[in-house]
Image: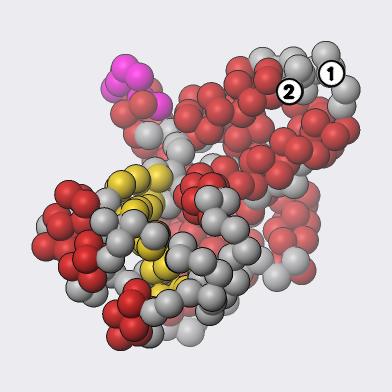
Amino acid sequence: MSKIYLLYGEEKYDLNKKVKSIEKEFENLQVGLNLFYITKENIDELDTVSQGVTFFGTKKLIILKETGLKFNINLLEENDEDTTYVIIENSVDKRLTEYKKLSKIAECIEYKHLDQNQMADYLYNMIKRYGLVISYEDAAYMCSVCGEDKSNNINELQKIVTYLKKGDSVTKEIIDKICARTLNAKIFDVLNLIVNKNKEKAISLLNDLLEQREPIIKIYIMLYKQVYQMYIIKQAKQHNVLDAAKLFGIHPFVYKNLASSSDKYTLEKLKEILHCFDEYDEKTKLGEMDFEIGLKKIICAM
C-alpha cells in the first residue's frame, strides 16, 4: 500500500517542515515528472496521476492541497508503496466518511496553533539552546511583541541570535531594538499612550499606522478588543475572581499590563468607552461618520 499522510491545522511552520522532511526521501523531484500537485480544481486528475508512470524511477510524490477530502480515498489505498500521498488541509471535519477512512490508513497529524503561553515557553527554551540568557518574563514580552505566529517568532529570534554572542542576555531593550512589532503590539502601544494621558503621541502613532496602510477597521477592532479585555478584567478584580488570566485565556504578561491600565478607569467609564465604539461603528455603517474620526474621538475621550 502507498504511504499516506494527512497533515492539517493552523501551525503552518511545523506542517511545512514535515512536508519538507517527506520530500527529502525522494531524489530529483520535478513537478510533472515525479512530483504532482492536486487541488479541488484538478481533483479529477487524481486517478490519472496516480496510475501514471514516472520519468525518474518508480517513486512518486502526490501532494493534495485544500481538497476538503472530496475525493475517492480508495484510489490512495489501491496504489503500491512507491507512491506517497501528502494531503494538506487547513482543517478537517472528523465526521466525514473520508476522514474516518483516512484515519485508518494514513498517518494523521494535527498541527495546532500555539497559544501565548506555549509560544513564550517555546521562545524561552529556544533562546536557552542558542546559549543566550533570558528571563521567562522577557520571553513572554517577546511573544507579546512578535505575536503567536511561530514562523515570525523564529525569524525574529534569528535576528537576535545574529546580533548577540553566546552568553549575552536577551532583554526587553534588545527585543525592542531588534524585533519587528506586530500590528497587535503596535495597537497595545497606542493603548498604553492613551491610558497614560499622552493623547498627542497616541494619535501620532495611529497616523503612522495609517500611513503604513494598516486597515483602519482592523485597528478599530483590535483596540476595541483590548478595551473590552480591560473591562472584563476590571469586573473580575471587583468580584475577586481567582486566576482570571487563565479563565479569560489572556497571557499573564498581557493580563498584567491590561490590569494595570484598567486601574486608571472606573467600570462605568470603560462601559461608556465600549458604548462609544459600538455607537461609532453603527454611524460609520450608516455613512454618518468616518472610522478614523471615530477612533480619534475615542482616543480623546479616554
Q: Residue furthest front?
A: 57
**Labels 2 and 1: the sequence-earlier one:** 2
Vertical arrangement, residue 289 with respect to residue 155, above or below: below
Q: Identify the amino acid type marked 1.
A: Lys
- Rendering coords of residue 266 (x, y %): 45, 34
Give the magenta range. 238-245
Residue 247, can we see it? yes
Residue at point 49% right, 47% down? Answer: 18
Residue at point 48% right, 84% down? Answer: 287
**Disc marking residue 166:** 1
The residue lying toward the viewer, choosing from 198 and 213, is 213
Q: How many marks?
A: 2
The residue lying toward the viewer, choosing from 100 and 230, is 100
- Disc 2 marks which residue? 130
Residue at point 76% right, 69% down? Answer: 211
Q: Residue 38's image quarter?
A: bottom left
**Residues at badges 2 and 1 in contact (C-beta under 8 Å)?**
yes
Q: Residue 27's image quarter?
A: bottom right
Tag 2's secondary structure? loop
- Rendering coords of residue 31 (x, y %): 56, 75
The type of colouring in the image is: secondary structure
Vertical arrangement, residue 226 with respect to residue 287, above or below: above
Mark 2 to mark 1: distance in Å?
7 Å
